[in-house]
Amino acid sequence: MKIVHILYSGLGGHSSVTFSLVEADQRKTNQHILIFYGIEDLPPGSIEKCRQLGISYYFVKKQQGLDIGSYKVIVRTLKAVRPGVILLNSVNLILPVYYYRLFHKTKIISIEHEPNHLKGKKDWLWSFLLVPLSKNVVYLTGLYYDQMKQKLGLLFSQRKITVINNGINIGLFKPVVPATNEAVFRIGMLARLSGTKDHATLIKAFALLLKKNTITKDLVLEIAGEGEKQEGLKALVTELGIDNKVHFAGMIPERAAADFLNALDLYVHASLGETMSTSIMQAMACAKPMIASDIPGINNMVLPGQTALLVPALDEQQLAAAMEKLIIDDNLRDQLGANALNYAQAHFSNTVMFEKYERLF
């Protein structure tokens, strides 16, 4: 079966989950081809990963706003590839993909990633179009399924819609003891620097943490990712006078992401909206103690108090207090990390994810 995956070009969960899905196809019975689409350039790490896996890829650059020209390129690319299945992660492309489907025999499987409570009118338009125009629609969690069932009403099709949790390569994302300076305590976050994330609250909380006289360790904040909020966040760091304590690592490839996570002593995921965070799954699989925002899309994929501590979004005071608690309490950090690892191995395997998608293929 020739399967085309259409996904966002920049750093984010699309590429990581897609690569994990391809890696789980161990029998190699399917030919996987990737079409990256977006306003951001294709990261060198994604190119290298495609080469490592021996898969073909295309990159379609999108202009800001409505870009009909890029839609035409997508259709031409599909005509050249002629897939049996299109796995559509970038659901804003459902119209050109369906246009291709009108003239060619192929199956469209669309995957919803956007958190429902952050969707604008345009996002909801795609959600309503996906069901009639796709052969199957995949929601990542049971919570998302219930929300969409209520929102779509008569458009909801139990026959077409299924829940498949994202998975990660737990052979790559696993605990490794790094050779780091034990005197330095590293706190980090791995995510796009976008409006749906809450890096600003993390930075403000970290600044509060540096003023605590209860902490004797040398604290460092590591932020991996790129996006439209990058310059503003760097300006905030400068404004708070903590430039020497915050490091922006930029966009990093998947293998480097595993190294990045394993070098941390504490993972913090401050966010305003998630569907099923890939970074959280990766951090848990690396046995990282975690603090995360108490929002839908996070609080339904961790066990609060057991695999992560949850704090309200946009609350730097409570986030700073939770970080202080875990920095001081070594035993609680070890317990959270061990529980997170066990949970990730049981629930986030890419092999289980692939088996479910293969039934749809």
Image (cartoon, rainbow, N blue to C red):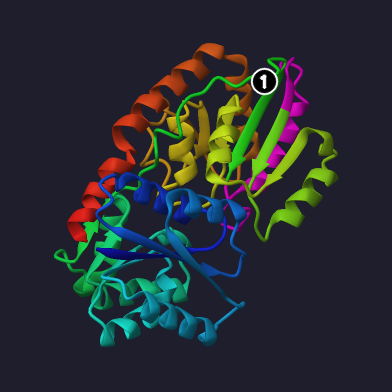
The location of residue 133, given as percent across then percent down, is 27, 78
Query: As shown in the figure, which amino acid type bears the numbered disc 1?
Result: Thr
Residue 231 visible in rendering = yes
Compared to residue 60, the image places residue 331 above or below, namely above
Question: What quarter of the picture does the N terminus occupy?
Answer: bottom left
* Quarter holding residue 216: top right
Would you say 19 lies left or right of 205 here?
left
User: Foreground residue, 1 or 70?
Assistant: 1
**Secondary structure at numbered mark 1:** loop
* Quarter holding residue 149: bottom left
The location of residue 212, given as percent across then percent down, is 74, 22
Would you say 181 lies left or right of 61 here?
right
Q: Does residue 209 show up magenta in the picture?
A: yes
User: Foreground residue, 141 or 260?
Assistant: 260
Q: How busy is the neighbourhood of tag 1: few (under 14 within 10 Å), some, or many (20 plus)? A: few
Compared to residue 301, the image places residue 72 above or below, namely below
Task: Report the span colored magenta.
Answer: 191-219
The location of residue 211, given as percent across then percent down, is 78, 26
> Can you identify the residue that label 1 sits on?
180
